[in-house]
Image: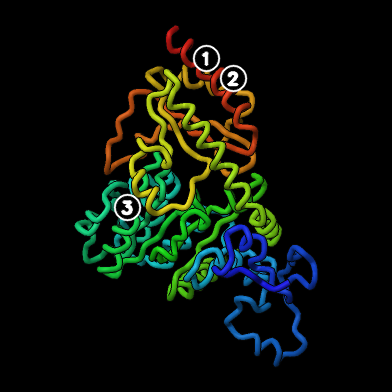
Amino acid sequence: MSDMGDDRHGDATRVVNAGRRPEWTAGIVSTPVWRASTILYDSVADMRAAGRDTHHRLFYGRKGTPTQWSLADALTALEPGAEGTFLYCSGVAAIAGALLSVLSPGDELLMVDSAYDPTRSMATGLLKRLGITTRFYDPMIGAGIADLIGDTTRAILIEAPGSLTFEVPDLPAIIAAAKARDVVTLLDNTWATPLYLPAIAMGIDLSILACTKYVVGHSDAMLGSVTAGAGRFAALRDTGFALGQVASPDDCWLGSRGLRTMAVRLAHHQQSALKIATWLTARPEVARVFHPALPDCPGHDHFRRDFKGSSGLFSFELRGGSDHARSVMIDGLDLFGIGYSWGGFESLALPVDPARYRTATTPAFNGPLVRLNIGLEDPDDLIADLAAGLDRFAAAAAG
């Protein structure tokens, strides 16, 4: 079996075969779990010959084993034009590692106002303490971001789509403005994954995944990754090594296992979520549905132009009602769990209040919002569960 993780093959073929080098698998279908701290050498000369370039060469457990390298190589293969991938113990760690690889004291970061809350907290907490300033921008700013780029701006962080409200930014316009001023672009690509949005090929410098979500896919491991475009990997790797970042080989094995089915899982997530989102648009209790593949979602035209597909996460706004009525709806759901994260095989429902986290924009909502992770269950069963929940919401809102 050769490593067929290149762009000559389709997505499903690449996720099955990428990262499976014969020297790492030794005839075993899945790369085994290599757990290690100390690596033993045959001689002092052999130890010294190991050198400092330890990616793909055994040196010390913290620098990786074939288990980690296999997953990193596979993720790199999913991004045409990528130079390499560094793995982290979580998605938040990946975001931190990516930002710290390009920012220094005195620099400015432009961050999308719809960013994931822990990412915002990192900007206003850790980065601020390090002397790095952050300005938040409208997710729909497009080419207008050029007007925000100043002399100290070093990086732009994007989410596509935005967290909680799912605006789809004009990626080519932002990328072009950044490249014109030699500003690094970082994209949280967890929602679409490289299968549905080939970020590096579009010109993004650093593509970030919370692999906990669709890569792992089974809600049983924390994992993150950053894939670097040409000329960006060395700084990313060196920063990760300096911070002592290491992803557990057991979690990386779970990530590799999940990756092999990601293409077929994403297709099911997409199909079911679209069916449910479309059904929700016809319910009288629902004011708006925020799903990038639906025409009314902000940035839908960008989605149609740039994305190859959609995934299973979206939100909707209830028509009036209160937080209590929303809780009545969610608490009584049978097939939707209540919990953070998403991307697993199980469906989840979560109350969300995005206005609390915005500073550059002021989104207006006339009712509370619910975020859904559509899992792998039968969508008709999920629709029946949601229908009963919306009936409960209407009764509670009227009472």
Please, what secondary structure does the residue beneath circle 2 have?
Answer: loop
Tell me which amino acid carries mark 1.
Answer: Arg
Q: Earlier in the sequence, mark 2 or mark 1?
A: 2
Q: Residues within 10 Å of mark 2 (few under 14, many from 20)?
A: some
322 vs 263: above or below: above
- Residue under the image location 49 percent in, 27 percent down: 279
Q: Nearer the viewer, residue 390 or 36?
A: 390
CB within 8 Å, label 2 to label 1: yes
Q: Residues within 10 Å of mark 3 (few under 14, many from 20)?
A: many
* Labels 3, 2: front one: 3
Residue 66, position as x, y percentages in the image: 69, 70
Q: Which residue is mark 3?
A: 170
- Residue under the image location 43 percent in, 46 percent down: 116
Q: CA distance from mark 3 to mark 2?
A: 39 Å
Residue 244, position as x, y percentages in the image: 56, 66
Q: Is residue 132 visible?
A: no
| Image quadrant where one finds the C terminus | top left
Tell me which amino acid carries mark 3.
Answer: Asp
